[in-house]
Amino acid sequence: MDRARKNARSELAVSRSVAELRGVLNRWRAEGDSIALVPTMGGLHEGHLALVRAARTQFSRVVATIFVNPMQFDDPVDLGRYPSDIGRDTAMLSQAGADLLFLPAAGEMYPPGFATAVKVSGLTACLCGAARRGHFDGVSTVVAKLLCQAAPDAAFFGEKDYQQLLVVRRTVRDLDIPVRIEGVTTVREADGLALSSRNFNLSREERAAAPALYRVLSEVAQALAPGGPAQAALEEGRESLMRAGFARVDYFELRDGETLTSLERARPPARLFAAAWLGATRLIDNIPVA
Ligand code: PAF
């Protein structure tokens, strides 16, 4: 590790308990700081760092969290495969301008006797909610907890997980949690692949096939933009993904970008959503239909 990276890593303070986190944040608030939260599960990449940097431009303190939330995984194999390298993640957060890392253990987030869940209905019935049972209950519960623990002025989420962003906005509205939710545009590789911690799991061949997800979404979005019937273009999108090497398509759908209602024709704010498997890795992406 070079000297700059070493220094950067040692500058990032780490809180492991809610009490410790609140102690630091109360001190900062008393000093007049504004506070942004960037929740993550680690396995960091430029997409996460874009959230930290966006937060940095608007708030004087940026708190990142890393917690691989077991409650949002419906598959223990998927949970076990989730990439984790705290040393690397800490150095990256520090270099991107985070001030503090909240790194709770599972027992801190879900102590014995934990029995509460936040369940958002409607928005969670489709797309990833249909394919991954209980996933969004886990997301809204852990995000509600993190927001209560840190009480930030704003929290930042990527648009790559667009349904998650809508579920978080709904949670905050419905529970009157006083925080602004900021969505940040998806960061992509040069070939269009949306950055994701799951990309680390792709083999060379799978990585070569992966950009087809964004390419096909873009082609179908263009075909749908004039507002004609969507069904045939969506079916062609699914077939194109299979031809490009995807093993299975969980969904390839046109929906309203605010309510997630299914659309038969594009009209603002229409959005295309896709989830598909390359080997054992499930990739998701979404784009607006202009
Ligand atoms: O997007 C993620 O990484 C997670 O779903 C989140 C928001 C950190 C909750 O665990």
Image (cartoon, rainbow, N blue to C red):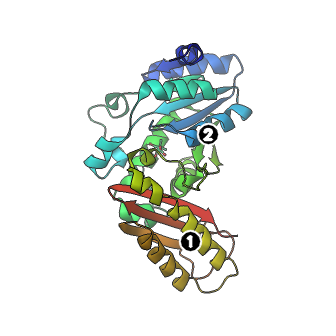
Vertical order, 241 against 88 (above or below): below
Sequence-wise, which precedes: disc 2 or disc 1?
A: 2
Q: Position of residue 204 (x, y in %)?
A: 41, 51
Dot 1 lies on which element?
strand
Three-letter amino acid code of the residue under disc 1:
Arg
Residue 194 in view, yes or no:
yes
Residue drawn at the location 58% of the way across and 22% of the way down: 25
- Name the mark on residue 146: none
Residue 258 in view, yes or no:
no
Q: Is residue 128 left or right of residue 35?
A: left
Dot 2 lies on which element?
helix
What is the quadrant of residue 170 in the picture? bottom right
Q: Which residue is mark 1?
A: 255
Q: Position of residue 82 (x, y in %)?
A: 36, 42
CB-based contact (under 8 Å), mark 2 and mark 1: no
Q: Position of residue 102 (x, y in %)?
A: 48, 26
Residue drawn at the location 58% of the way across and 34% of the way down: 37
Q: Is residue 173 left or right of residue 267?
A: left
- Give the camera-side residue of 39 and 17: 39
- Name the mark on residue 51: 2
Three-letter amino acid code of the residue under disc 2:
Leu
- Give the camera-side residue of 242 and 64: 242
C-alpha distance separating marks 2 and 1 = 25 Å
* Closer to viewer: mark 2 or mark 1: 2
Vertical order, 22 against 240 (above or below): above
Position of the C terminus, as image quadrant, is bottom right
What is the quadrant of residue 107 in the picture? top left
Residue drawn at the location 55% of the way across and 23% of the way down: 100
Vertical order, 233 against 78 (above or below): below
